[in-house]
Amino acid sequence: MHIRHAGDANEAKRVFLAYSGDMYYVLGFDGGGTKTECVLMDAEKTVRARGHSGPSNPLRVGFGGALAAVCEAARWAMQDAKVLPEEVAGLCAGLAGTAQAEAARKMKKLLGEEYPGRVLHVCTDLELTLEATGDGPAIVLVAGTGSAAVGRDMHGRNARVGGHGPLLGDEGSAYDIGKRAAMSALREYDRTGITSDFGAKILKELEVDSWQEFQTRVHAVPDEVFPRIFPLVAKAADEGDTGAREFLQLAAAELAWLVNDLVERLDLREQKFLLVKSGGTVQRSRYFDEQVNQRLREAAPRAEFGALATTPAEAAARIALRLLANRENERSERGGD
């Protein structure tokens, strides 16, 4: 399943010779709790192909699962572009769940075994979104399976808040919203012994026949359960359901608190800056979008709403190209040793 090469000096030499000519490629990965995107980019910063696979957050799917997803996405991209693994000179993997140094180190070690001799960098998916905003002060609010915010001030100083996972955070995320909705439906069932209409929709969506089976699924794979409930809540809110709207109002407030904390930390209260919303909950519900926008305007009145200048996966590939150029410059300064 994996792209495996011999991790010896000969392999490193072959890789160097492959990209020492005019054409070589890099891989950029954007991985989170539900999916992974890979961009194959050439030396001229042209995207040659894209590949997709499942989740690659090592804290949610394990390091082996994350590695498998990254390699699968890379394989699809390289097959599509008819590029050999030996032609890949470097890669940057921006993965959720790698904020802690030990997690990043372990992921980098595993990737190094898969891609020996390459320039290799591991960072968080949040760092990629900030890179994708371009230059200048900016904040990116990520609201997908999890939630977090990352920003940059006038002097280029970066900071992040949130992104601590479902046990310690992820407030306002699809996971959080789905969990709250499921808890409410389950409490209603405990109180009356009758499954509500919304509870029935949850069971149908997850293809389970009872709340007991639902609980078994939750304990086994919560990441595959709660985010799937979010679209049901979003649809119900757009149709005027009061309970669904309450869940989304609370989620919008919690997401705005993340941005507010970052505005304070980066001293952006009186500064104009770019504010970008990203993640799987964005543009899924007219009502939720309105609530989030309203709360964000209160938290950051001078922010200018905008979009990323490029995709996070493309930003990762550009980082790989930059690191590769830096290594070649260092090699030249040392006289090509």
Image (spheres, rainbow, N blue to C red):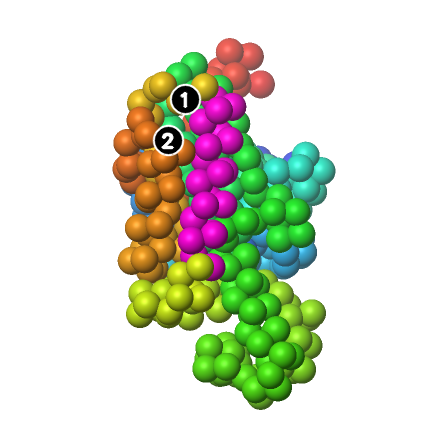
Q: Earlier in the sequence, mark 1 or mark 2?
A: 1
Task: Tell me where residue 70 appears, x and y as whole percent.
Answer: 54, 53
- Residue 85 part of the magenta segment: no
Instruction: State how many labels appear.
Output: 2
Q: Is residue 135 left or right of residue 215?
A: left
> Dividing the picture into quarters, in which one does residue 234 lie?
bottom left
Using the image as rendered, state which of residue 67 and residue 10 is in the foreground.
Answer: 67
Image coords of residue 15 (percent x, y): 52, 39
Q: Is residue 14 visible?
A: no
Residue wearing tag 2? 300
Q: Nearer the viewer, residue 61 or 113?
A: 61
Identify the mark at residue 268; answer none if there is no mark: 1
The picture quadrant where one finds residue 44 is top left
Please, what secondary structure does the residue beneath circle 1 have? loop
- Which residue is nearer to you in this view: 311 or 24? 311
Q: Amino acid at mark 2?
A: Ala
In the image, the segment drawn in magenta is 247-266
Disc 1 marks which amino acid?
Leu
**Where does the image place residue 112, in percent across and percent down from the top left?**
63, 42
**Which image quadrant: the C terminus?**
top right
Q: Quadrant of the N terminus?
A: bottom right
Where's residue 262, x and y in %?
49, 29
**Residue at x 36% of width, y 19% of height:** 270
Q: Residue at x 56, y 49 (%)?
A: 170
